[in-house]
Image (cartoon, rainbow, N blue to C red):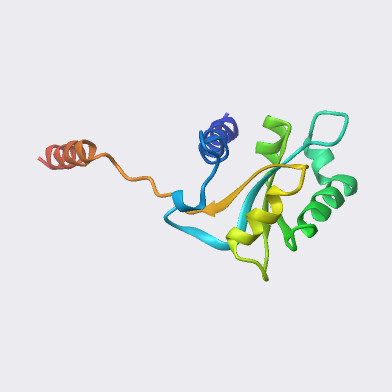
Amino acid sequence: MQERKICALLVIMASLVFFAPNGPALAAYDEYIEGEAIVLLKNISKTALTEDSLAGDAMREYVSEEAGKADAVAAYIYVTLSVETDEIFVLMKSDSLSTDELIERLNMNPNVISASPNAIFRVNPIPDEIEKSAELSTTEAD
């Protein structure tokens, strides 16, 4: 059950990143890891993705080849998220390209659905929630 909740949260976060009305824009991210991108690749297999298929040689070769076309490496495949969406979520890294250049190259590939910076997200409470939290902590201390 916990894994499903985490997966749902990842799907929501990924949706916010990948499916923004005007597409992901680098300027929209305050912080991201230079030379890295979160990439959504098409599932080119004729079957639904599974943990086993993602771990197989054919799929790993496909992901590596797609990364190589952009002068990058596939650093990590997000298995649970990929299985749930039937598209392949991959962290790609490049030692020679900036994030802008990497995303530009990735977006030229017809097998890439979307590519976005590996953004650093911070969850900040809303000011009202900070006040309520402070009230709760002083009330509990009494």
Outermost bottom residue:
96
Task: Quadrant for the N terminus, please.
Answer: top right
User: Is 120 situated above or below 71?
Assistant: above
Q: Position of residue 24 (x, y in %)?
A: 54, 44
In the picture, the quarter occupied by the C terminus is: top left
Residue 7, by quadrant, is top right
Classify residue 59 by image quadrant: top right
Extreme-left residue of the structure = 142
**Closer to the camera in the image, 105 or 129:** 105
Q: Nearer the viewer, residue 83 or 114?
A: 114
Q: Is residue 63 left or right of residue 96?
A: right
Q: Judge from the rendering whether residue 137 lies leftward or rightward of residue 100; answer left or right.
A: left
Give residue 15's position: percent from left, percent from top.
55, 35
Q: Measuring 84% from the left and 39% from the top, which residue is drawn there?
A: 53
**Residue 111 place in picture, x, y as percent:** 78, 42
In-front residue for pair 23/43:
23
